[in-house]
Amino acid sequence: MKVFRLDDLEAERAANDGAYLRFLRERNMSAGLYALAAGELDPQKPHTQDEIYLVVSGRAAITVGEETTYVGRGSVVYVPAGVPHRFHHITEDIRVLVVFSPPEG
């Protein structure tokens, strides 16, 4: 069993000065914590894996393909592999748990 605490992951992500911290990589999936500050631009490019976002804090809009919606704590978004997507109009610092399948990189 592997157990992670969001506070610990956030501290590690911040200490490494990055927007993304991958904390798990297994045969069929990987997981990470993604963070963007209010007003920040999301530089993501489409990924070769399916992914699920679980917003753990903050508020923003997300566009996946041609669809846009607003998300906040508790929102879950599925992004199919290869589809352009990005967070924008980030009004509160956002922290997102990301699950990739198959695992990223």
Image (cartoon, grey):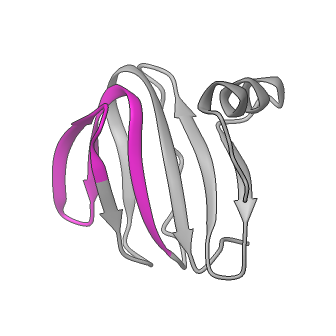
Residue drawn where x is 52% and y is 77% of the image: 49
* Magenta region includes residue 84: no
Instruction: Name the residue nearer the viewer: 62 or 57.
Output: 57
Instruction: Name the residue nearer the viewer: 73 or 18.
Output: 73
* 33 sits to left or right of 93: right
Instruction: Name the residue nearer the viewer: 1 or 94.
Output: 1
**Magenta portion: prevailing SS class:** strand
* Magenta region includes residue 56: yes
Q: Of all residues shown, which one is farthest toward the right?
A: 16
Percent x, y for residue 100?
55, 68
Residue 24 versus residue 47 in the image, above or below: above
* Range of magenta residues: 50-76
Percent x, y for residue 25?
73, 66
Q: Quadrant of the C terminus?
A: bottom right
Q: Is residue 42 visible?
A: no
Percent x, y for residue 92?
37, 18
* 77 sits to left or right of 104: left
The tally of labels here is 0
Q: Quadrant of residue 58?
A: top left
Residue 61 versus residue 80 in the image, above or below: above
Residue drawn where x is 30% and y is 51% of the image: 76
Q: Quadrant of the N terminus?
A: bottom right
Residue drawn where x is 37% and y is 73% of the image: 83
Percent x, y for residue 98?
52, 53
Q: Is residue 104 visible?
A: yes
